[in-house]
Amino acid sequence: MKRLTIGALVTASALTAGLAGAAEIAQASPASEPVTWHTAWTGPRDGVLESVTAPARDSAWAVGWVRHRPLLVHWNGRGWREVTFPVKGYTPYAIAASAANDVWMFGVTANETAEALSWNGAAWIKVAEPDIGGEALSGVAVLGPADVWIATQTAAYHDLGGIWSKVRLPSNFVMWAGGQLGQLAGTSDRNMWVAGTLTTSQGYQILAAYRWSVDRWRRVRIPRTPSYTAEIQVDSRRNVVIVTPHKVLHWNGARWTAMANQNSPTVGPLAPFGPHGFWIGAYSLWTGSTWLTVLPMSSGYPAFSNGLAQIPGTHQSWMAGDTHLGAVIMRSSG
């Protein structure tokens, strides 16, 4: 398994757009005040957080590393604190959960063997991952203690009660895995999606999406969109968002709606915002009716988002990433 790129890549044009739009973010938010990001925790210098999950209001986890050692941070409802990493010689890539007592961490051991760690509410337990060779993770989804999905660029793997099965994808379909985990998402085994690119016979790269149906992947009809990468968020069968560098597509269960990606050409982690909105990275917010541009700042430095997670039962989200000073966790208003 290859190491994922450190940091969410934000282009200079996106940061410029964020600075220019920072004074205008209060125009049309569901919240009564402007939507902003507030620093909740700052970590060691040279540290970076890559992934965050929030199964409950009083439970959240984030993983990353600092100076070649793994970094694990926990929210207990009152504050964030770094906790002792449960194993030695481990490199974490992603963390996901279905409940406060069902948290999964994905990564590799010191000898580059893929291995997951599962938190049951009392202890971390080692769980074998499938052998994915040298491929990088491109997505993870935890639906329950015995129902876990992971994806690489060319295949998906499904764990039902400790038995992993490989689910092949079409040979000309690829999920990008250059720095973000977001090409696999779902709410159940009948509503699991992957997004990526297909290479046409003419050599063009176009957006493609597949949904798992009982025993195989079925291609989803989608507006033709040139793309080399995509992120996907699935909240229900009637609420699916796919983001490419230039276009945002929303599925409402009956039809697709296409919008321009306001911070083109950025693609970052996604998180829901209310019943009809979503974050793209921590910079672009679709409220359900209006695009807002937000620039997260921590201690006077721009913060780069590598992971997002909605806080259950709220419009707020956790953002895990880094600044010039090191690892950071921020919380959105709203």
Image: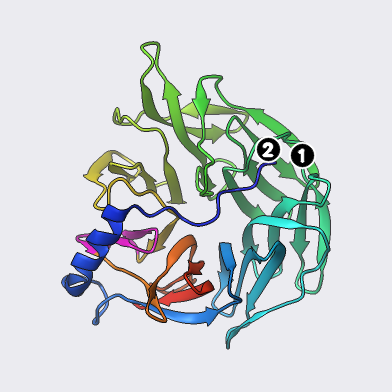
Q: Which residue is drawn at 40% across and 61% down?
A: 272
Neighbourhood count class around disc 2 (C-alpha, 10 Å): few under 14, some 14–19, many 20 upward: many
Quarter of the image that includes the C terminus = bottom left
First in sequence, mark 2 or 1: give its number.
1
Considering the numbered disc 1 on the image, is that residue within a helix, a strand or a loop? Answer: loop
User: What residue would you read off at disc 2?
Assistant: 157
Can residue 288 be spotted in the picture? no
Residue at 65 percent across and 45 percent down: it is 149
Q: Residue placed at 44% from the left, 64% from the top?
A: 304
For the residue carrying disc 1, how many other residues have a C-alpha within 10 Å: few (<14), some (14-19), or many (20+)?
some
Q: Which residue: 42% across, 74% down?
A: 314
Quadrant for the N terminus in the image = top right
Residue 149 vertical position relative to residue 101 in the rendered view, above or below: above
Figure check: 30 above or below 179 = below
Instruction: Tell me if I can see residue 173 in this picture.
Output: yes
Q: Position of residue 106 (x, y in %)?
A: 70, 53
| Residue 195 location (% of width, % of height) | 46, 37
Q: How many marks?
A: 2
Q: Is mark 2 on a helix, strand or loop?
A: strand
Q: Which colour scheme is used?
A: rainbow
Q: Which residue range is magenta in the image?
A: 275-292
Residue 221 versus residue 263 in the image, above or below: above
Nearest the camera: 70 or 199? 70
Q: Which mark is residue 130?
A: 1
Q: How far apart are marks 2 and 1 (CA)?
A: 7 Å
- Label annotation for residue 51: none
